[in-house]
Amino acid sequence: MSYSVFDLFKVGIGPSSSHTVGPMVAGGRFIAELKESGQFEQVTRVSARLHGSLAHTGKGHASDVAVLLGLGGNQPDTIDPADVTGIVEHIRGNGVLNLAGEKEILFTEPTDLIFDFEEVLPAHSNGMCLYAYGADGNELRSSRYYSIGGGFVANEEEMSADRVIAAPEVAIPYDYTTAEELLRMGEISDKTFPEMVFSNECAWASPNDVRAGLDNIWNTMRNCMERGMKAEGILPGGLDVKRRAKYLRQTLDSDIHRNAALPHECMDWISLWAIAVNEENASGGRIVTAPTNGAAGVIPAVIRYYEEMCPGADKIGIHDFLLAATAVGILIKLNASISGAEAGCQGEVGSACAMAAGGLAAALGGTNKQVENAAEIGLEHHLGMTCDPVGGLVQIPCIERNAMGAVKAINAASLALRGDGDHYVTLDAVIETMRQTGEDMQSKYKETSQGGLAVNVVAC
Ligand code: SF4
């Protein structure tokens, strides 16, 4: 099976792709199942149980809100983030849930939405069960879902068959599962990574639609960044983290006007762009998974660096960036994981850094071997990075970590572009190392907020 660029870069809302977007998608899938089975009309009550990492950091990641929104028939890509508070206040204030947006049923949140801290479901740490009951109180249906990172959701059957619903199954011209295969396909076809990924995308959509979709991804990322640079105040969740993108922008602008910019200020701009996106994510704003919400700032910051600071940058370069980043993201998703709950932060910010490094190298005209090398460097130097969000919120260390990941990605691309593409460690070897490291990592470092900074920095 393969994934599309539009699977990896999905428009949704913050703060988490696995803990917010995924549970919302699961709620929607449950509704669809009820309708398909003809049981929807009989439903008078629903309940949800969140397990594992979804229980441990679900509050901070708004997983409860996401389930309510999904059961209410809302979609992550179309819901207006400004409407979320009103919808949830209505449910909580009145004790009713507008199921699928079609019928109001009673909903008592303390008993109908449970965070189960004891049981971890077998297939993945981000497990959840949804139940529907009839008027006699008997269960009509129950379904188990896993939110496996990046907004991807799989049911029990899909997990056991290792088959995740993504882009519809079609024959694609470049069906690769390893970087080695992709490099070989490039040699035989004399095509670049972006050209091969573009050809694959055209198996699902027309070339014009693919290009329009890529423009939409970048426009949504850019709008998110602009909103982040204008907003001020405290991020929600209780840590009292002050938004700083606007202030950073002002100080950088004033340095330009005073002609006082130092050479390394280039890095501050990159950090600013990443931070702006991640502050929007932390406040539940409109976000593009890249490949997850927690790591959503890295790729936009590096694209903006390309767009504003690299001579000759153009729209096709941005498309090439996203397409090459997709090739890298697919390799990681197929062979390791992009989920913090599965692999720690190496799977989120590490993957985003590798994708951004490969994307930038491609946009700057790198050879396939240089693109692969850039991605490899980006991922290699995130190996072992744990996930330990303070207070279960996607704020500390996540926001700054994206800034670091973006700067590192540019460094990785630059190093690779100064070489001839020959290098010792392959991208495939690093991805496999990340998989093994993630497997060996204790669960307290995998999005449970039970280790690392989460226990050494006291949440207020
Ligand atoms: S520490 Fe990394 S993996 Fe964990 S929530 Fe933050 S960004 Fe995601």
Image (tube, grey):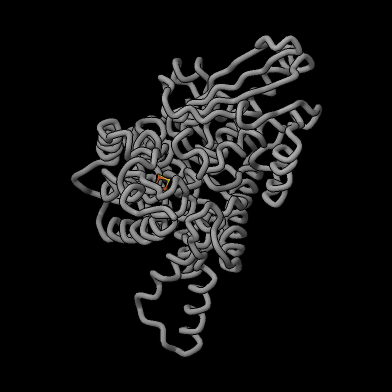
**Towards the viewer: 406 or 314:** 406
The vertical placement of 411 against 141, above or below, is below
Residue 421 picture location, percent across and down: 27, 50
Residue at 47% x, 25% y is: 1
- Where residue 407 sits, quadrant-wise, is bottom left
Residue at 37% x, 56% y is: 405
Q: Residue furthest bottom?
A: 258
**Towards the viewer: 105 or 397:** 105
The vertical placement of 80 against 171, above or below, is below
Q: Is residue 321 left or right of residue 422?
A: right
The vertical placement of 445 against 237, above or below, is above
Quadrant (top left, top right, bottom left, bottom right) of the C terminus? bottom left
Residue 369 visible in rendering:
no
- Where residue 141 sits, quadrant-wise, is top right
Residue 134 picture location, percent across and down: 73, 13
Query: How many labels, in total?
Result: 0
Q: Residue furthest left?
A: 424
Residue 130 picture location, percent across and down: 60, 22
Q: Is residue 56 left or right of residue 144?
A: left
Residue 174 picture location, percent across and down: 45, 32
Q: Is residue 174 left or right of residue 441?
A: right
Residue at 27% x, 61% y is: 418
**Towards the viewer: 369 or 86:** 86
The vertical placement of 72 against 352, above or below, is above
**Towards the viewer: 11 or 199:** 11
Residue at 36% x, 44% y is: 387
Residue 94 visible in rendering:
yes
